Image (spheres, grey):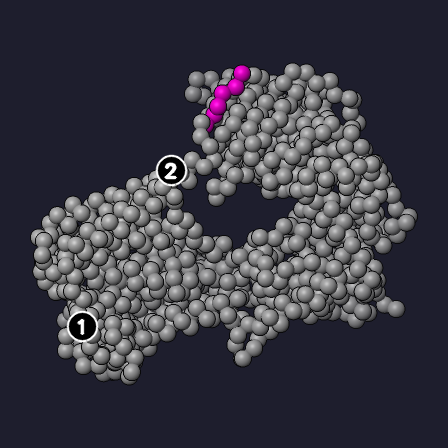
Amino acid sequence: MAPVLELRGITKSFPGVLANDSINLSVEKGKILALLGENGAGKTTLMNILYGLYKPDKGQIFINGEEVAIQNPSDAIARGIGMVHQHFMLIPVMTATENVMLGVEPIRYGIFLDKAKVAKRILEISTQYDLEVDPNAYISDLPVGAQQRVEIIKVLYRQADILILDEPTAVLTPQEVEGLFKVLRSLVANGKSVIFITHKLKEVLAIADTISVLRGGKVVGTLNTKDASQEKLATLMVGREVNLVVKKKPATPGGVVLSVKDLCVRDESENLIVDRASFEVHAGEVLGVAGVQGNGQTELVYALTGLAHVLSGEISIMGKPLHHSSPRNILERGVAHIPEDRQRHGLILPFPVHDNLVLCTYYQPPFTKGLDLQQKIIIETAEKLVDQFDVRTPNVFVPVSTLSGGNQQKVIVAREFSRPIKLLIASQPTRGLDVGSIEYIHSRIVEKRDEGTAVLLVSPELDEIIALSDRIAVMYKGQIVDIVPAERVNKAYLGLLMAGVKSKEALEMAPTTSMEEVDRVT
Amino acid sequence: MTTNLVPKNAKSTNLRTRLAAGILLLFTGLIIILLFGVNTKPGLNTTFGLTPLGDKNVIPIPDLVLPAQPAIYVLAIVAIFVGGWQLARGIKSTGLLAGVVAFCFVFAFLIWAARDNSMDLVGMMNTSVVRATPIALAALCGVISERAAVINIGLEGIMLMSAMTSVMIATLLHNLYAGLVAGMLTGMIIAGLHAILVIYFKVDQIISGVAVNIVGTGASSFISNRYMQIYTDQINNSGIFPNIPIPLLAKIPILGPVVFENNVIVYIMLMLVAVTFVVLFYTRWGLRTRAVGEHPKAADTLGVRVYMTRYVNVILGGLVAGIGGAYFTIGSVGRFDKMMTAGKGFIGLAAMIFGNWNPVGALGSSMIFGFADSLQVKMQILNIPVPTEFLQMAPYLVTIIVLAGLVGKVHTPAADGLPYEKQ
């Protein structure tokens, strides 16, 4: 029997890049194909071609053995292809029903929307596939996991047989990931086919039937899950052997560097987003802050770095309080900041690399003499840093916007680490980076810790938190719900805390499960 | 060693706004007493006419006669009582508070202004509806266009051009309806140009809107000066739409003379508000329009044609604004003068925002502006001791106050003003 979907020789180039280079793929009915690859490997381009958002330069697409031309998303939908985008394509101010019906609205009395009919169908789908959703709930009121279920229902409502999920687990808690996997299994059991795009090795091994690995726009290997291992996949994905485990010695904590007591911060719409947070970070240790995105971590970091107004509470660094300090003031006390959004808060994109490398210190000697910037010294310093931190750039004069994400992040790391620091605040330091860059950034952070720097690491990636931290704080709805030593923690417990379960109940629900066992489940 | 950074708790800001609102109410009460109460001699009556003089259609009802000074004091006490309540307990709805303040103040002002005299209240409310008509049409144009995420601040220019063409065509063809159609077409053409500039060429929407305004005012003023003031009888003297009382409905006391004895443009405006509301929230087109205004990419991935939706909405908005323009000439004075819209397009945009991008809300807030306008006219007639120039500022002052302070939690369409880039 012909595969449900087959791609032959798909090639697509953008100015200067060959995004997809004669790619062959096939998906069987009732199976899950994982498409594994680093950022920029061409996964998303390929799926956008399949969904009709891009036109391929060359190549053929077959559905059930029949060649098809997909010009736009409507064609794709008509052919039974549905896509769950990484950034949800949902309209927050509308209800689940309205979102599901958009584009294929049933009509009654000639002109009016038939919402009742859609709501009924949603309930049918949701019972059939175990996708619990309230059709009348507004999207903005739903947690991320439920929003994803609406996205999946949206695709199923259009009677898709092939579901493409683009990085579906990036925004979910471990429990929600498990829920998603359950849904995927029930989908394939009902004869649907799934393409699962990700760069997370563990998930691929847990859910996929076959795995195709993409690198540099080419399929570098297709294998059955039973023949695959994490090491094998990582090597295929990166093209060289990768060190998946962060090597680190036990921490030797020193005195308190950062102390936060009863910190409250409000967000733009005046909601209390950080709620009486208290913790300490010692010299020579990494305190990881885990939590689902949007639980106040961003605002916590803003408050610590002087980017947000503090409503109440106390922050002190090396025993000295911050009292309405400006960001520059805070930097000068030896605080380094790797911001969550590197393009908005970390770099001035149109500026050349060398200027970006001295953004924290350009006004001090030796970079300034009187009113005069010492360009020569700045450039020399920048060239030294570029070498030292292995930033891949043609020279230091190109705008930093032309660098890849990983190299942009290295520019920030080089800038922050090249001055004497006592506290490092790293917010999602590896967001959107490839495995190679992640490895590099992680080792530099551990190195700083071993030099005696206090590190506050904020990340929604639980794996990253567990790999790097000495102690782990969990944030939920603005509160630090628990702080635990990293060696004594298990992932299920953290996941429950992140989902808002009280720590006592979480302990009862996940008392003995060791890390390894949980890893196998998820 | 640590210090407290900001010595206040999370509730303090709420408390402060509560205190401020309460004190404002108390203050309003005092102003009412000092300004109006003390200046009114005891024993005077104020008469509010509830049946327009000489109106044969409506079932007559007796006039409302109030003892002036006691009535003013009652209003002052209401304001003070609500203020005290707010201070002591807090009232959730800011809209309610603002409504109470505005009502007490305005009503006390009317009683004072018409003391020992009579005032045609129903006539004034009718004037409010009439004056609100072009504002509401402008606001409706804004709603239709901005719900699809295209800002159209060129309303003023569109309305001026439509006002001019409608009176020209109406005079030339001796047909007011032809003039109305000409106004609509003019609005559609100019809005269409704006649409092409901002959707196809991705010109900044504000800049394009400003350009439309400048061209609209410039061209219409030039043509007016050069031709229309000279060949008045040939091209600038159309007559106006007559008032048509709606059978039966016009008989209802108060409501009849206020709403159902107007000209055709007022009726069109009211119908358009209702139609737009239904279309926007209960039909396929409306759902797609809102989707395009909130998250065009999501709409696009579901096969909704984003650009097409935007073109159609902007051009339909132009049609509505064209009717609003026609109102100034063939709907009210029958001739064109330069700059005769006098900022009504911008007030319309304010009404759209205050009405939370909802057609019915836009009508409601247009009424507030219309009321401020009719109040100003009435006061000039009543000869109150305030210079005319200050009275004429009323609608614009209300605009500023509304936009600065009273706009509560409105939701702007999320993609409003942003061009959509297809991949």
What is the quadrant of residue A22 in the picture? bottom right
Q: Which one is nearer the viewer's eye here, A506 or A58?
A: A506
**On the image, numbered disc 1 is attached to which residue?**
B62
> Residue type at mark 1?
Pro
Q: Which one is nearer the viewer's eye here, A183 or B9?
A: B9
**Residue B311: % across, % down:** 47, 66
The residue that appears at 52% across and 27% down in the rendered structure is A313
> Residue type at mark 2?
Arg
Q: Main secondary structure of the magenta part?
A: loop
Tag 2, which secondary structure?
Answer: helix
The residue that appears at 83% across and 48% down in the rendered structure is A206
Along the horizontal axis of the image, is B171 left or right of A371?
A: left
Q: Residue B74: within the magenta? A: no
Q: Residue B2: within the magenta? A: yes
The earlier-in-sequence mark between 2 and 1 is 2
Question: In the rendering, which numbered label is found on residue A95?
Answer: none
**Split into 4 quadrants, where in the image is the C terminus of chain B?**
bottom right
What span is in magenta?
Answer: B1-6
Question: In the rendering, which numbered label is found on residue B16?
Answer: 2
Residue A319, compared with residue B120, is above or below; it is above
Tag 1, which secondary structure?
Answer: loop
Q: Is residue A6 visible?
A: no
